[in-house]
Amino acid sequence: MGPDCTYIAVTPRAKHAEHAKPKSTKPQPNGDSPEEANPGFREDVAIDEFVDHRVDTDNSTVDIQVKWEGGETTWESEWSLQEQVPTLVFKYWDKLGGREAATNLDIYHAFNILKHTAHPGKSKGDKYMYQVQWVGYRAADSTWEQESKLRKIAPSELEKFEAKQLASGASTEKRKTTRGPGRPRKNRRVGD
């Protein structure tokens, strides 16, 4: 992922609804009503292998052809597969020499925000830096991005991360320690 690449956020597309049960809903990046995230999995059927992939150059997304146990094949979105079976997705791209080489895409979609850190001395819009995992890439390949950039390219992922932080009770502000400076004395001072 080079410096001259474009980063945007996408939500998974529903594919082959007749073969799957809806798993969840995802908000649309543009604020529209949620669409069902339909990974195309049947709970009683396992994946045999990934056969092929196709690139949608208009949206810079990838669909992967899945061969199911039993022989049936369907096209599933890379996003959905990464949510359900990330290890298989990463092994597939490794087998092809890496996702970037196999797809020739230079636009990346935010998959998940892993964590954040304070970004002191920056403008109000860049109060934090966020560690972002990209669609088709392992968490180890994540990058640190400015808050203002994520507000433009991945507002729904940023909102989801912030909601998760609030639900877990984690503050976006740095926690203040309750201890004073240094550690407490082991022995009382003479004359106390």
Image: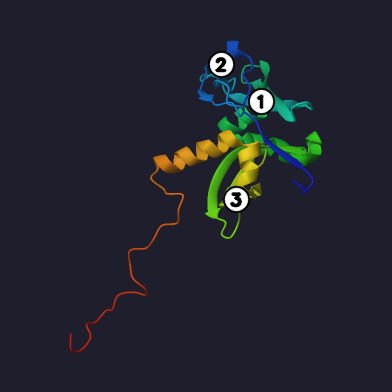
Q: In front: mark 1 or mark 3? A: 3
Q: Secondary structure at mark 1?
A: strand
Gap between marks 2 and 1 measured at Cα: 13 Å
Instruction: Return the disc, 2 or 1, that comes first in the chain's sequence.
Output: 2
Q: Residue furthest left?
A: 192
Q: Which mark is residue 77?
A: 1
Tell me, yes or no, if residue 111 can be seen here: yes
Q: Are marks 1 and 3 in contact (CB under 8 Å)?
A: no
The residue pinned by badge 3 equals 126
**In front: 48, or 82?**
82
Identify the colour scheme used: rainbow
Number of marks: 3
Left or right placement of residue 13 versus residue 164 in this view: right
Q: Amino acid at mark 3?
A: Asp
Question: Which residue is under mark 2?
Answer: 20
Toward which corner of the image does residue 14 lie, by quadrant? top right
| Relative height, residue 80 to residue 191 (above, below) | above
Neighbour class for label 1 at 10 Å: few (<14), some, many (≥20)? many
How far apart, in angstroms, are the residues tagged by discs 1 and 3?
32 Å
**Residue occupying the point 81% across, 36% down:** 104
Q: Nearer the viewer, residue 165 or 80?
A: 165
The crowding category of the residue bearing disc 3, from other C-alpha atoms within 10 Å (few below 14, some 14 to 19, many at least 20), is some
- At mark 3, the secondary structure is helix
Where does residue 169 sit, x and y in percent of width and height? 38, 45
Q: Which amino acid is tagged 2?
A: Ala
* Badge 2 element: loop
Q: Residue at x 40, y 39 (%)?
A: 167
